[in-house]
Image: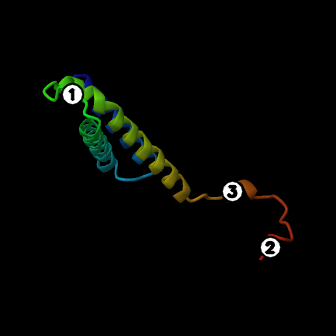
Amino acid sequence: MLGLLLLFFIGKYYYELAQDYYKHRWLYGVLGIVIYYMGTFAGGFIIGFLAVLFDWSLNWGNTTALGLLVLPFGIILAYVVYVLLKKKWKKETIKVKDEIQDIGRPVDETESN
């Protein structure tokens, strides 16, 4: 149940980020969940590789413990990609000058044609 709640919030934050920058909301909401699962898969691979390398005796049948071990990898990867997307999209935003506020102000010589 807590895993579904975690997936909901990851998808929600990606959805809202895409909404703020006028991107495809559902696509990025699902992408956030996929990125989380990619992080957990990579974390499981890293833990498995280190277990073989250092001869750790892990109980591979205990899925709850393994799920808790790979949880931080998924959360960290989802957060890093979120921050990178936010930075990228913030750079891409177009800044529009509000010219209505300048009506009636004297024109500088440097700004004219």
Asked whether residue 4 appears in the rendered view, the answer is: no
Instruction: Give the CA distance from mark 2 to mark 3.
Output: 17 Å
Q: Could you tell me which residue is drawn at 75 percent across and 57 percent down?
A: 102
Q: Earlier in the sequence, mark 1 or mark 2?
A: 1
Which part of the image, by quadrant, shows the C terminus?
A: bottom right
User: CB atoms at circles 3 and 1 under 8 Å apart?
Assistant: no
Q: What residue sits 42% from the left and 39% below the top? A: 79
Question: Mark 1: which secondary structure?
Answer: loop
**Residue 103 in picture, x, y percent from top left:** 75, 58
Residue denoted by label 1: 58
Q: Nearer the viewer, residue 108 or 68?
A: 68
On screen, 5 above or below 113?
above
CA gap, disc 1 and disc 2: 74 Å
Q: Earlier in the sequence, mark 3 or mark 1?
A: 1
Give me the residue at 84% from left, 71% from top. 110
Mark identifier at residue 112: 2
Q: Amino acid at mark 2?
A: Ser
Query: Which amino acid, mark 1?
Result: Leu
Question: Going by the picture, which residue comes out furthest to the bottom?
Answer: 113
Residue 75 is labelled as none
Let me know if residue 83 appears in the view.
yes
Instruction: Report the label total.
Output: 3
Q: Which residue is mark 3?
A: 100
Quadrant the N terminus occupies: top left
Q: Earlier in the sequence, mark 2 or mark 3?
A: 3
* SS under mark 2: loop
